[in-house]
Amino acid sequence: MLIQGYDDGPLVSGEPLVGRPGFWANYLMAMCADGTCVERPAPEWFGDDGADCDSLSETLLDPERWPVFRVPAADGPGVAVIYRNLVGDYDIDYLLTHPDGSYAQRIANWEGHLSGTGLTWQELIRTADAPSCDAKGVQDRAARLLLVLPLCNDLDIPPAALSRVTDALLAAGAPEETATATARHLLGHVMSRPSHDPGWDSPLSHGGR
């Protein structure tokens, strides 16, 4: 797999891992530490268990194979999530990808928190709800939303976002008794981020779509 700017990285398709037990706990559990959580987030919140989570973690963080999760969009730029597994410099990169694959722009990275510009809630929804059936990548709308959720950089999230994220978690295998609380913690992490600079613009706000 080739992505501009990652010529030296051993990129591999990560999409088959999305359905594996332990994936969503690995990917999203750190976001549940929103400062209001009185109990430690656990894999069980996502329908996973600790053994599955630990096993898949070894695959996700393999320095010789960097998983890439593609979220192509039919009506504009998509997103690529790359586990950049450099020895001693682990990180997750988020890229905007052009529909024809001509370029990829890194807009943010995650290392315990989001660094970069991110996207608005409405942009995340448009991306999640517009899969490109002609491109390789994740097509399921629930999985697409959860993959791009860490990119949310919007302090004006609508109330309906809670039910939308809850439904996505349920579709991904989260238990009914924990899904709403987990969604609340995920969104709470977004809302607890520092306020935007008044001049902040999403990378999609200048004709990206």
Image (cartoon, grey):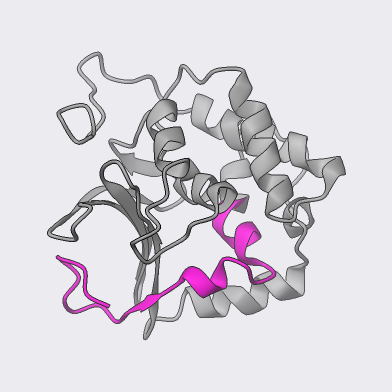
Above-or-below relation of 172 to 66: above
Residue 20: say if magenta.
Answer: yes
Residue that lies at the very extreme toward the bottom in this rendered image: 64
Above-or-below relation of 163 to 75: above
Rendered location of residue 41, percent (x, y): 71, 49
Rendered location of residue 156, percent (x, y): 46, 16
Q: Report the quarter where the N terminus lies.
A: bottom left
Q: Give the residues in magenta.
A: 1-28
Residue 27: say if magenta.
Answer: yes
Q: Report the quarter where the C terminus lies.
A: top left
Residue 53's image quarter? bottom right
Q: Residue at x 55, y 54 (%)?
A: 140
Q: Is residue 74 left or right of residue 113?
A: left
Q: Residue at x 44, y 81 (%)?
A: 62
Residue 117's image quarter? top left
Q: Residue at x 56, y 44 (%)?
A: 31
Q: Is residue 34 left or right of residue 171?
A: left
Residue that lies at the very extreme toward the front in this rendered image: 134
